[in-house]
Structures are given as C-alpha cells and as structure tokens.
Image (tube, rainbow, N blue to C red):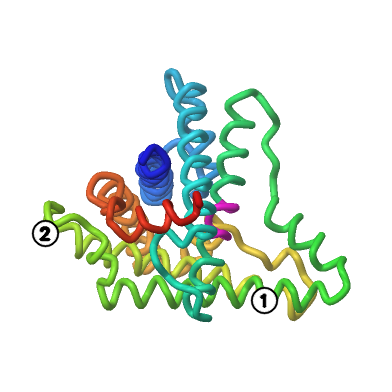
Amino acid sequence: MNRLRRLETFARTGWFARGVVYCLLAYIAITGSGASDPSPQGVFRSLRDMPAGTLLLALLGIGLALYGAYRLFGAALDSEGKGSEPKGIAIRIGYAASGIAHFLLAWAALRLATGGREEEGREQAAAGMLLDLPLGGALLGLVGAAFLAAAAHQAIKAWTTEFARDLSPQAPRWAVPVGRAGLSARAVVFFVIGGSLVRAGWFGAAAEVKGLGDALSSLTDNPTLYLLVAAGLFLFGVHSFVEARWRRIRDEDVIARIVAARR
C-alpha cells in the first residue's frame, strides 16, 4: 500500500505540474506576455523571472520528474491495465516515452533554476545526432510516425471521451468538454511535430524538426486556428488539474498488479 500511495503522489503531483506548464504556455502564446517563445522553455524563463521564481521553477521541475517516474513505473508495471497484446504494448511504450520526455523537461527546468545555461535548438541538435547514425533518416521517420500515432490516439480519446472513465464520479460535468477540447488541441500539435520529424527524416534536414513551441508558432499564418489551438492547450492544462484532483488511481486491479510485482 505504501507503494501505491507513492504512485498516487507521483501521479497527482505530476499532473499538477503538467497543468502549470500547459496553462502558462498557452497564456504566453495568446497574450505574448513576458516571452515571445510559446514553449516549455519560454514557460521556464517566465517563471524564473517572477518573484521567488527560482523556487517555483525548482518545484515545477520536481513535479515534472515525479510525473516522469509515474509514467515509467506505469509502463513497466502496466498500472493502467493495458495488457500485453500489441495495442497494449504500444500504449505502454508511449507511456515510457512520455516519462522520458517529462524527465527531460524536468532536467531543463532544474538546470535553469540552478543557474545553468539554457540550451537552444535542443530538438534540432538531437535530430542531427540521429541523422548521423546509420539509417538515421529512417529512425527519425519512425519517431515522427510515433508522434503521428500519438496524435491519432489523442484525437480518438477526445472523440470517444474514453478518458472520462478514469475520472471519479465526483468530477464536475465540465471536465469532459474541457478534456475533449484540450486533447484535440494536443492532437493538432503532435500532428505538426510528427510531420516535421517525418520530413526531417525524409530530406535529412534536422532544421525541419519542430518542438512544442515551434509547432504552435507554425500555426500563426492562420490566426483563428492558432488561437483555437492555444486556447485548447490552456484547456489541456485545466484537464491536467482535473486529473490531479479527480483521476481514479486506487482500484483493485492496480493493487493486485503491485502485489504481484513484489512477489
């Protein structure tokens, strides 16, 4: 049970931290307040410049690291019961990738909080390193395909509202439409990122790769779409707060898997 309580603490703290990142990112994107870079790094810079910003940034980094730990733990233990069939394994691999991504975000936040230098163009640099490997273009294309699959998964969750099954009955009614809007916006951003990775792999051009901020900024040619997606990302942040408060984690299946893993 102590293990289950730690899992719940990691999850809820992480969802809250993720909500902070997305809400601030959307706020920056919509208002241009404090930064012209609507990306997690732009959020971290804005937080750092606030009163007690270093402490807030450090706490945010810790929260993101806890969420990363929750996702990796859940992928290994199958804490959400996705199973060992190909579809379930694919979802669990996605959870593991999410865990690693949030660890990287946590590292960037903590590095900035401790006075480290900010790294520019990290996505392009990583893509360049991958392209230098044998079959690097194909590997980068596979990463892009994974993002496209994640975009489709987010869109399906928004359409079917399957995420609502994981919420407590005490969750407010508005949680479902907010979640649908947030997941839809995230699907658009993931689609743009995935497409950029596929193009980068095909043409061997690391400069094509877009991070979250670049993906959102690329929509500015269509102001209506840009504002809709930015607002949707804000709602995804609110959806993260909803999960932090009302997501159901304690159930008999999770307890049984944790007990079995300890034997």
Q: Is residue 122 left or right of residue 17?
A: right
State the CA–CA distance, disc 1 to disc 2.
38 Å
Residue 24: x %, y % from top left: 39, 43
- The amino acid at mark 1 is Leu
- Tell me if mark 2 has few (under 14), some (14-19) or many (20+) residues whose alpha carbon lies within 10 angstroms of its own: few
Q: Is residue 28 visible?
A: no
Camera-side residue: 11 or 180?
11
The part of the chain drawn in magenta is 96-101
Secondary structure, mark 1, is helix
Looking at the rendered structure, which numbered label has been put on residue 254?
none
Residue 230: x %, y % from top left: 37, 57
- Tell me if mark 1 has few (under 14), some (14-19) or many (20+) residues whose alpha carbon lies within 10 angstroms of its own: some
Camera-side residue: 124 or 102?
102
What residue sits right under mark 2 in the picture?
Answer: 173
Q: Is residue 206 left or right of residue 30?
A: right
What residue sits right under mark 1 in the picture?
Answer: 142
Locate the N terminus and report the quarter of the image it occupies. Answer: top left
- Mark found first going from the N terminus, 1 or 2: 1
Q: Does residue 119 belong to the magenta stretch?
A: no
Residue 133: x %, y % from top left: 86, 68
Q: Is residue 130 above or below residue 67?
A: below
Q: Is residue 208 left or right of residue 193?
A: right
Residue at 66 percent of width and 65 percent of height: 209
Secondary structure, mark 2, is loop
The furthest residue to the top? 52
Camera-side residue: 24 or 4?
4
- The amino acid at mark 2 is Arg
Q: Main secondary structure of the magenta part?
A: helix
